[in-house]
Amino acid sequence: MIIAGPLSPLEDLLRSVLDFFHNSAGLPWAWSIVALTICVRILLVPLVVRQIHSMQSLQAHAPQMKEIQRKYKGDRQKQNEELMKFYRENNINPMASCLPLVAQFPIFIALFYVLRHFARSHPGGDLSWLGVVPDISKNANTHWTGYLLIAIYAVSQVSSTYFMSTTMDKTQRYLMLALPVFFLPVVVRFPTGLVIYWMTTNLWTVGQGLITRRLAPKPAPPEKRSSRAAPKDPGDGGGDGAKREPPKPKPASGQAQPKVVRRKKKKARR
């Protein structure tokens, strides 16, 4: 209840949005959660744009950052200071990549309390989903379909983490990819509707990552040196290292010609 107190206005807002989709739009409660998730992700588009720009900037400056880490490998404090200085000089915000996740955390907690209220007091209407999930307010481990959703959640979480951790080093990336597996014992105790919310937002992130990769400019390939020899300069004497003497300028009209040339002309006349 300590967390629920400050989040009560947000909980009331989410309940109002769900009531709108259920009562006005005619959606079942489960699909209202899906619609709520889509609305949240649309509102987070500005943060997602900053996240993408931050990731692209980190990826572009990855060689310089790795060089700083290598240079100050033995001094962790100095390494962090140099990295922060490098971030300021290049206008990089490494925390921007976490903004969408941080912004969704209060929504996640508030929705948890909304679904718990659904479990205590039935809101009226159908709480099933797709004809197989009997009650989205019950914990995921109370029905076999909950485990199916957990499996989809795990795959979608790993996939979304794969797209969002491209700028991390290998050790951190492997750790981030393994975290969803360790959270599974906790997630199975969440209400099924909460798993639907997080599964939908993960699938949105995967689609976003695919679109970003397709639209992002590809790095220019490294220039390849041509195997064909460059054309030789007629004055460089070829490739044998010998220097060719520059051609002697022809005498202008009216100037005396060399004796050798005059002798050749006389012989030609004879």
Image: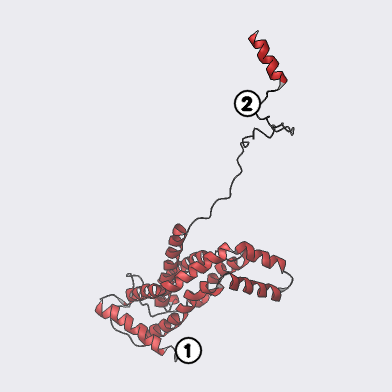
Alpha-carbon distance for marks 1 and 2? 106 Å
Q: Which residue is mark 2?
A: 254
Looking at the picture, the colour scheme in use is secondary structure
Q: Is residue 214 left or right of residue 235?
A: left
Give percent across and percent down for residue 94: 56, 72
Q: Where's residue 10, x and y in %?
A: 40, 86
**View extreme (front): residue:** 254
Kind of residue at disc 2: Gly
Res. 144 in view: no
Of mark 1 and mark 2, the one earlier in the sequence is 1
Compared with 2, 72 (above or below) is above
Q: Which residue is mark 1?
A: 3
Does the image show residue 18? yes
Q: Give percent across and percent down for residue 247.
A: 67, 30
Using the rendered view, name the quadrant where residue 117 is placed.
bottom left
In the figure, 115 relative to 184: above or below? Answer: below
Badge 2 crowding class, 10 Å Cα cut-off, few under 14, some 14 to 19, many 20 or more, is few
Given contact means CB atoms under 8 Å apart, are the residues at marks 1 and 2 in contact? Answer: no
Q: Residue 257 in the image: x percent, y percent?
A: 68, 23
Left or right, 33 with reference to 58 = left
Q: Who is closer to the viewer here, 191 or 225?
A: 225
Camera-side residue: 247 or 51? 247
Q: Residue at x 63, y 64 (%)?
A: 64
Disc 1 is placed on an element classified as loop
Residue ID at (40%, 70%): 200
Circle 1 crowding by C-alpha within 10 Å: few under 14, some 14–19, many from 20: few
The kind of residue tagged 1 is: Ile
Q: Nearer the viewer, residue 124 or 37?
A: 37
State left or right for residue 262 relative to residue 17: right
**Residue under the point 73% across and 73% down:** 75
